[in-house]
Amino acid sequence: MVNNYYTLRALVREWQSDLVGTTVLDVFSQNKNELSVALAGSERDWMVRGSVQRPFLHLFRVEGYSKARRNVATLFGDAIDRTVTDVRIADRDRLVYLDLDDKTTILWQLFGARANAFHVAADGTIREAFQSNDDHAGTEAPTPYPAPMPETFADFEERWKDNRNKTRQAVQSAVPLFGRTLARETLHRAGVETESPADCTEAARRDLFEAAMDLCEVLEKPAPVVYGEGQFPDAFSLIPLRHREDDSGERFDTVDVAVRSFVRRTLAERHFHRLYDPLEEALESAAEHYQQSAERMMDELDSESRAGRYERWGHLLMAQQDQVPERAEEVELPDLFEEGDPVTIPIDPAKSPVENAQHYYQRARSTRRSREEAERRLDETMERADEAQQLLEALREIDTLDGIKQFRDEKEDALLPFVEREDADVDRFPYRRFDLGDGFEVWVGRNARQNHELTFHAAQKYDLWMHVRQRPGAHTVLHLPNRDAEPGKHRIYTAAAIAAHFSKAKGSALVPVMVTERKYVTSPKGADPGVVRVDREDVIMVEPGLPE
C-alpha cells in the first residue's frame, strides 16, 4: 500500500509546508532505477527519492543531502537552482509533481510497467526523462487519468464485475483506488465472506459499498501502521487494518516517517535476500550433490564381487570356447573354479567367445578402477557434503541484514568451493533474466519465495506466465513491453524452453509447458509460496534449453 494513491496524497500534504520554497540543489541517481532530488531549505535540507523499478515502486523523503563522490552524474540540469513553488498529486492518479518557479515540473509517474520520472517544460513536453530519454524527450508528458470512484450504490453496481475470480477483486474493480489491501479491509468491515462475486447478494454488495465509503472517510485522517515482527516489515497501511488486528504493528505519528521506515526496511529485506537466496540455493545444491556422489561411491565399494565375477566369466569363456554356440545371447558353462551349478553368462552374439571374454576382462579392470577411485574420493566427498550441510544450517539461523553480511564476510573462504562468484553480485535484477529483444524479457524465479513474488507482484496481468506441466519447476514470465505487444511464436517457444530448462524435466527430450496470461494465475487461500491455481491454459511441447 506504500504506492497507493491515498498514501501518496498523504505524503504530498505533509511535505508541502517543508518543501515549498526550497531550492533544487541536485538531481541524480546513485541507486539503480531510483531518482533523488536534493532540496535546500532555510532551516534544513531534504532528499526526495523515488524508485521506478517494479515491483517496488515508491516515493519517500529523507532529511539531509548526501551523494556518492564518484560516478554519479547530475540529471535534469535545467532544474538546478530553481525554487519549488508547489508539491501536488494529480486528482485520483499516481502522478506526483514538484512545480518549479520557471513553470517547469519534476514529475514522478508511479504506476505501471512504464513508471518513470521526467523534467517537464512549461508547455507540457518532456525536457528530459530519467529512463529511456531518447524515446521520451520532446514528447507530451503523461497526463492525469482520474480513476472512477463510486459516489452512489448505483455507481458501485455499474463497476461490479461478477466474472472476477474473487470477491476482493470485484471490490477492486468497483473501487479502483483501493487496491488489494483496502479491498480486503472492505470485505472484513462489511462482514462479507462470500468467495465468488457472482454469489454476492444485493444486500452484501450494498454492505460492501457502505464499508468502502466509510473507509474513504477514515483515509482522510491517516494513522499509519507498519506491520511485521523483527527487522523486516510485512506490510504498510495508511490506517490500522481490522482484518489484521491479531498482527503486531508499529504505529507512527506521520505518514512521512512511516513510509520512510517501511521503504528502508523493505529495501534492507530485499538486500538481505539478494545476499541470502543465492547462498541457500548453492549450498542446498552442493549438499545434495556431494551426498549423492558419496552414496554412489559407497555403492561402488559394495560391489567388489562384480570385478571377480566378470574376470571369472572371462576365464570360463576362454577355457571353453568350443562350448559357446554361434550367435547365442547367453551360454551356460560348467564352473571350473568352484563345484556347484553351471554358470550362465550373457554374451554379445555379434562377438566371438574370445572377444566376449576380453569384454569381461575390461569390465573387471574398469570396476576395480572405479573402486580405487571411490576409495580415494569418498572421504573427501563426505567431508564436502558435511561442510556444505553445516554452512547451510548456519545460514538458516540468520534473519538480519547485518547477520548475512557478517556470515558472507567470515565464511568467504569456506563458501568458495560451493558458490559461484556471480552470487556475490548483490545489485543484480532479483530474478534470472533473459533479453529476447525489442523490450521482451523472460524472468525466472529462483525459489518458492521468488516464484510467488515474481508471479503476483513483478509480472503484469497481461504478461505470459509459464510452468512445466505436472512437474516441479520455476515460475517463468515472458514480460511484454506493453499490453498490446505481440511476442510472436518464436519468443513464446523460447520462453517455454527456458521454463523447461529450470525444471525437474530438463533432461527430457520434449516437455509440456503451460502458457497463460498472468491474470489467470491465482494463489489458493492458505497455500505455501509458489503454489498456484491456473484457471485457463494452453500447453506447448518444447525442448528444454537456454537461448544463445
Image (cartoon, helix red, strand yellow):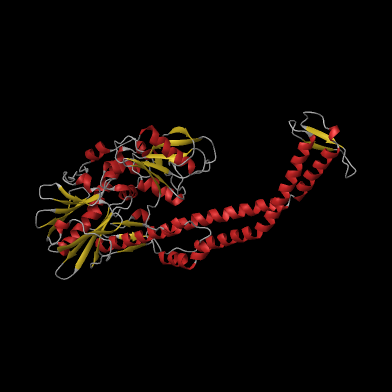
Q: Is residue 177 left or right of residue 373?
A: left
Give percent across and percent down for residue 48: 23, 60
In this view, the residue in front, 415 or 171, is: 415
Q: Is residue 195 left or right of residue 209?
A: right
Q: Is residue 14 left or right of residue 227?
A: left
Give percent across and percent down for residue 538: 43, 32
Residue 63 occupies quadrant: bottom left
At a point 21% along the width and 57% down the height, the residue shown is 75
At a point 14% along the width and 46% down the height, the residue shown is 125
At a point 75% along the width and 31% down the height, the residue shown is 349
Q: Residue furthest left?
A: 102
Q: Residue furthest right?
A: 339
Position of residue 152 relative to residue 274, above or below, is above
Q: Residue furthest bottom?
A: 43
At a point 73% along the width and 48% down the height, the residue shown is 365
Could you tell me which quadrant the C terminus lies in? top left
Q: Is residue 258 left or right of residue 358?
A: left
In this view, the residue in front, 174 or 456, is: 456
Give percent across and percent down for residue 294: 64, 54
Give percent across and percent down for residue 470: 51, 38
Residue 363 in view, yes or no: yes
In this view, the residue in front, 327 or 102, is: 327
Position of residue 534 relative to residue 302, above or below, is above
Residue 165 in view, yes or no: no
